Image (cartoon, grey):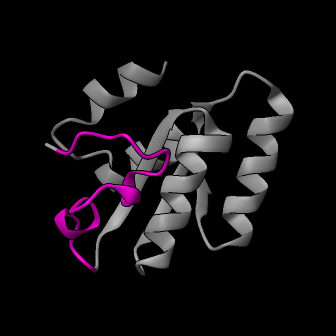
Amino acid sequence: MVAKQSFGACGEEGFADRIPANAQVIVAGWEAHVCVLQTVLGLLETGRQVHVVRDAIGSRQPESKETAIRRMERHGAEIVTTEMVLFEWLRTATHPRFREVAALIR
Protein backbone atom coordinates (compact mmCIF):
# COMPACT_ATOMS: atom_id res chain seq x y z
CA MET A 1 0.00 0.00 0.00
CA VAL A 2 1.18 3.52 -0.79
CA ALA A 3 -0.09 6.34 1.42
CA LYS A 4 -0.95 9.28 -0.83
CA GLN A 5 -0.04 12.80 0.27
CA SER A 6 0.85 14.24 -3.15
CA PHE A 7 -1.96 15.38 -5.42
CA GLY A 8 -0.54 13.15 -8.15
CA ALA A 9 -0.03 9.52 -7.08
CA CYS A 10 3.26 9.38 -9.00
CA GLY A 11 4.62 11.90 -6.50
CA GLU A 12 4.62 9.16 -3.90
CA GLU A 13 7.84 7.20 -3.59
CA GLY A 14 7.55 3.76 -5.13
CA PHE A 15 4.10 4.25 -6.66
CA ALA A 16 5.15 4.08 -10.32
CA ASP A 17 7.56 1.22 -9.53
CA ARG A 18 4.55 -0.95 -8.63
CA ILE A 19 3.10 -0.60 -12.14
CA PRO A 20 4.72 -2.68 -14.91
CA ALA A 21 6.39 -0.53 -17.57
CA ASN A 22 4.17 -1.96 -20.31
CA ALA A 23 0.94 -1.64 -18.31
CA GLN A 24 -2.24 -0.07 -19.60
CA VAL A 25 -3.50 1.93 -16.63
CA ILE A 26 -7.22 2.65 -16.16
CA VAL A 27 -7.78 5.83 -14.12
CA ALA A 28 -10.92 6.93 -12.29
CA GLY A 29 -11.38 9.24 -9.34
CA TRP A 30 -12.52 12.51 -7.90
CA GLU A 31 -11.16 16.00 -8.57
CA ALA A 32 -10.36 15.44 -12.23
CA HIS A 33 -8.59 18.78 -12.46
CA VAL A 34 -6.25 18.11 -9.52
CA CYS A 35 -5.51 14.55 -8.38
CA VAL A 36 -6.67 12.69 -11.48
CA LEU A 37 -4.91 15.16 -13.80
CA GLN A 38 -1.62 15.11 -11.93
CA THR A 39 -1.67 11.32 -11.61
CA VAL A 40 -2.37 10.89 -15.32
CA LEU A 41 0.36 13.35 -16.34
CA GLY A 42 2.81 11.57 -14.03
CA LEU A 43 1.95 8.16 -15.46
CA LEU A 44 2.31 9.47 -19.00
CA GLU A 45 5.74 10.89 -18.11
CA THR A 46 6.82 7.40 -17.05
CA GLY A 47 5.75 5.99 -20.42
CA ARG A 48 2.62 4.16 -19.24
CA GLN A 49 -0.39 3.91 -21.53
CA VAL A 50 -3.20 5.69 -19.67
CA HIS A 51 -6.97 5.39 -20.15
CA VAL A 52 -9.10 7.96 -18.30
CA VAL A 53 -12.67 6.82 -17.67
CA ARG A 54 -14.66 9.97 -18.47
CA ASP A 55 -17.84 8.91 -16.66
CA ALA A 56 -15.86 7.73 -13.61
CA ILE A 57 -14.12 11.04 -12.85
CA GLY A 58 -15.60 14.18 -11.40
CA SER A 59 -15.01 17.75 -10.29
CA ARG A 60 -17.16 20.19 -8.40
CA GLN A 61 -17.36 22.41 -11.49
CA PRO A 62 -18.20 20.84 -14.89
CA GLU A 63 -15.77 23.18 -16.68
CA SER A 64 -12.92 21.98 -14.45
CA LYS A 65 -13.64 18.38 -15.44
CA GLU A 66 -13.87 19.16 -19.15
CA THR A 67 -10.70 21.27 -19.10
CA ALA A 68 -8.83 18.46 -17.35
CA ILE A 69 -10.10 15.90 -19.87
CA ARG A 70 -8.92 18.04 -22.78
CA ARG A 71 -5.52 18.54 -21.18
CA MET A 72 -5.04 14.84 -20.40
CA GLU A 73 -6.02 13.94 -23.95
CA ARG A 74 -3.59 16.50 -25.42
CA HIS A 75 -0.82 14.89 -23.38
CA GLY A 76 -1.61 11.42 -24.72
CA ALA A 77 -4.22 9.85 -22.45
CA GLU A 78 -7.01 7.85 -24.06
CA ILE A 79 -10.42 9.09 -22.96
CA VAL A 80 -12.87 6.21 -22.56
CA THR A 81 -16.15 5.34 -20.84
CA THR A 82 -16.95 2.65 -18.29
CA GLU A 83 -18.89 0.67 -20.88
CA MET A 84 -15.98 0.81 -23.33
CA VAL A 85 -13.57 -0.53 -20.70
CA LEU A 86 -15.87 -3.32 -19.56
CA PHE A 87 -16.60 -4.65 -23.02
CA GLU A 88 -12.96 -4.37 -24.10
CA TRP A 89 -12.06 -6.51 -21.09
CA LEU A 90 -14.73 -9.09 -21.98
CA ARG A 91 -13.95 -9.08 -25.74
CA THR A 92 -16.93 -11.34 -26.58
CA ALA A 93 -20.49 -12.13 -25.53
CA THR A 94 -19.32 -15.69 -24.86
CA HIS A 95 -17.20 -14.51 -21.91
CA PRO A 96 -18.36 -16.37 -18.77
CA ARG A 97 -19.08 -13.07 -16.98
CA PHE A 98 -20.80 -11.30 -19.91
CA ARG A 99 -24.32 -11.41 -18.44
CA GLU A 100 -23.11 -10.29 -15.03
CA VAL A 101 -21.22 -7.31 -16.47
CA ALA A 102 -24.00 -6.38 -18.88
CA ALA A 103 -26.44 -6.30 -15.95
CA LEU A 104 -24.22 -3.77 -14.16
CA ILE A 105 -24.57 -1.17 -16.90
CA ARG A 106 -28.28 -1.54 -17.62
Label count reads 0
Residue at the image position 58 percent from the left and 34 percent from the top? 57
58 to the left or right of 101: right
Image quadrant assignment for residue 62: top right
Q: Is residue 53 visible?
A: no
- Answer above or below: position of 7 versus 30: below
Q: Is residue 96 visible?
A: yes
Foreground pick, 40 / 12 = 12
Residue 71 located within the stretch drawn in magenta: no
Query: Residue 99: x percent and y percent?
Result: 28, 28
Query: Residue 27: x percent and y percent?
Result: 45, 48
Query: Residue 56: x percent and y percent?
Result: 53, 33
Foreground pick, 99 / 23 = 23
- Image quadrant holding the N terminus, namely top left
Residue extent of the magenta highlight: 2-21
Residue at the image position 62 percent from the left and 73 percent from the top? 76
Residue at the image position 75 percent from the left and 60 percent from the top? 71
Foreground pick, 94 / 40 = 40
- Answer above or below: position of 60 versus 71: above
Magenta residues: mostly which secondary structure? loop
Image quadrant assignment for residue 75: bottom right
Residue at the image position 51 percent from the left and 48 percent from the top? 84
Query: Residue 97: x percent and y percent?
Result: 20, 35
Please identify the residue farthest to the right as the structure is shown.
63
- Answer above or below: position of 48 versus 37: below
Image quadrant assignment for residue 103: top left
